Image: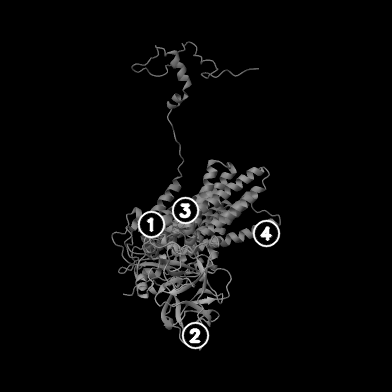
Amino acid sequence: MSHPPPRAGKEGGLPAQAPAGQVQRRAPLCPAPCGRPGPAQSWPRGQRRAGRRMPVLGALKRPVLLRAEINVSLVALAVAAVASRLWGLAGPRAVVFDEVYYGQFVSLYVKRIFFVDDSGPPLGHALLALGGYLGGFDGNFLWNRIGAEYTMNVPVWSLRLLPAVAGALCVPLAYQILVELRFSHCAALGAALLILLENSLITQSRLMLLESILIFFILLAVLSYLKFCNSQKRSPFSATWWFWLLLTGVACSCAVGVKYMGLFTYVLLLVIAGIHFWHLIGDQALSKVSVLCHLLARGLALVVIPVAMYLSFFYLHLTLLYRSGPHDQIMTSAFQASLEGGLARITQGQPLEIAYGSQITLRNVLGKPMPCWLHSHKNTYPIRYENGRGSSHQQQVTCYPFKDVNNWWIVKDPGTQQLVVSNPPRPIRHGHIVQLVHGITTRYLNTHDVAAPLSPHAQEVSCYIDYNISMPAQNLWRVEIVNRESDADVWKTILSEVRFVHVNTSAMLKLSGVALPDWGYRQLEVVGEKLSKGYHQSMLWNVEEHRYGKSQEQKEREVELHSPTQIDISKNLSFMAKFTELQWKILTLKNEDTEHKYSSSPLAWITMDTNIVYWLHPASGAQIHLIGNMLIWTSANAATLAYLCLFLWYLLRRRRRICDVPEDVWWAWVFAGGLCVGGWAANYLPFFLMEKTLFLYHYLPALTFQILLIPVVLQHLNDHFCRSQLSKHMFQALIVAWFSSVYLTYRTFSPLTYGEPPLSPAELRALRWKESWDILIRKH
């Protein structure tokens, strides 16, 4: 048996042999500079040992090399996308469509003034405000008219930069999504080019709007989940696996944080993740502990982290916006008091505990149809109403939506005639009986068995006037603290939500919300509601302004009611209390939806039967429209229809045990379609259930998923329906011609996308491809 010779130069082997006729010499360790031993000198023995013990020195002798693979196509796409979105970004230098809406919030953000936007969470507004902040915007601009010229202090380019960058990044994201779906480079390139050349996406991303940011986070979430799925096959629980899983949750939370429309894609990914985990459970190669770890990891990344990040968006919002603003009135008194200025300036010196003799204003907790305070004035109910019913002719009690001296009431102890706070004060607790005396007229809050003016099923509430008839006063009320921690709780300013139960009839003081006729000055009706289940907010009241009364005489008391309070007590709400209230307001606050000229129904979006005129130059006639690339929209609908037909055909034939495509191709086809068609349906169909004003731009996230489906269907047709080389070449030639037409359509409508150059009336008429499109043509 022969053995291989020992390797030369390696430890444990023999030294390399010199060729015959040559003398073997040991090479020097290194050149001998000044002061160093050369070949003729020997290193000290200790130094030779140290050299062998320090392999790092050997590594330093070799250069450190980094190799990187650059996808030139992807880089070129990204550069083209940035150029298409950022070219001429500062023009037009005027307010374009919904910039008039979002610009108001940017100004409020820059000035740190609190606001509420019922359209969604605060992240999108914060990102737009970040652009303004980086551009040095001071927030001073009056956002009151579309087309208004921006003043020089408004950094238009900076305000529009972030949406433009987000829109540009959608192009390489589309490419990467098709790659992760295991489709060819050509299919991925096609998806990216379609996103690049879609006019509506370009228009929306070049303005200070939120749709491009939303679509960016949606595509980032989809890409991250696909990369996570592919990492799952190679190396579960690796650093890469964790990175993409966590990024999926982060991107989903950001999408929801920009607009609630992001919730549609988030739910879609949760469903897909649930299906994948269900298959994971059936994998017998995994232990129970491993399956549990997979479940916990997905729960952490896809549920816990998104919820935590969503809360952090509101925390940032409430931390930055600490000043009182125009939207304070819709919030509770406690929330308003936590803001700097506004109500906080009024309530800063108020006593905390309500006592007998306290002077208070009572705000209805519901705040609908508008915030209002319990109010009375000297006018009485008419003897007879318009419908012929009679009234008590007592003093009117209403709910008034403005601050007024007639909103003040004095909390009186029924057992005494004293209208001032004793020393020490006697606090009022849950269940105590009180009388409420109107501060200016000194009449008692009263109710009796007389029908309310506009709510005949309820009792009339009034301030009692003694007409010396057989209708005695019934003015005792029991204080019930709804948000109490115990039955011994004290009634507190701002913090306590109370209801007043009439002792004689058990009716509860309630805001009906109906506006009284002219004799009631259109103020809101207050009634005594007998039949009540639970604690509806219309029956709840909280003390907003409060002082300890010191004047027994009426004239002195009237002066006192006009005076500010002086005792310093701060009332701070926790973050969770603020978040809960603000979130509830966002979800329940409904602006009066009026029919907009450019509003449309979801049915009109699919075929793009509508468009939106975003901006019109007052002189040249140049204009910007939200109008899509007609060829892309039509192709997207055709691809969706083709996919559904092919899917059902394959499904029926597989039921008959006929497999037209290999198994791996079938599941790739199902997954790609589930993602693209599912994304389209999830972002489109819910709008049929919404009762709000809808616009064409609401369809853009759904359209993006449809566009991703086009190259999926084209590659499938090329690979599995074109049998011969000739048919493949012909089909590919048709695709090239189709892409050329897409580009020509993009170029044709680019003047309406970028707002320049101005077009003549004849050119504008030529762009009206559909009669339903509103192309503005000036008459000269």
Q: Secondary structure at mark 4?
A: helix
Q: Secondary structure at mark 3?
A: helix
Horizontal side of residue 520 vs 616, given as left or right: right
Residue drawn at x 42%, y 13% is 44
Specify the amino acid type for callout 4.
Leu
Q: Residues within 10 Å of mark 3 (few under 14, many from 20)?
A: some
- Please indicate, yes or no, whether residue 662 appears anywhere in the rendered image: no
Between marks 4 and 1 in the image, the one whose residue lies nearer the viewer = 1
Residue toward you, 173 or 178: 173
Q: Residues within 10 Å of mark 1 (few under 14, many from 20)?
A: many
Specify the amino acid type for callout 3.
Ser
- Please indicate, yes or no, whether residue 569 appears anywhere in the rendered image: yes
- Mark 3 touches mark 2? (CB < 8 Å): no
- Cα separation, mark 4 vs mark 2, equals 74 Å
**Residue placed under numbered mark 2 in the picture:** 391
Between marks 4 and 2 in the image, the one whose residue lies nearer the viewer = 2
**Residue placed under numbered mark 1 in the picture:** 129
Q: Position of residue 601 (x, y in %)?
A: 50, 70
The disc, 4 or 1, on the residue closer to the chain's N-terminal end is: 1
Q: Position of residue 408 (x, y in %)?
A: 41, 72
**Residue placed under numbered mark 3 in the picture:** 312
Residue toward you, 326 or 393: 393
Specify the amino acid type for callout 1.
Ala
- Mark 4 touches mark 1? (CB < 8 Å): no
Between marks 4 and 3 in the image, the one whose residue lies nearer the viewer = 3
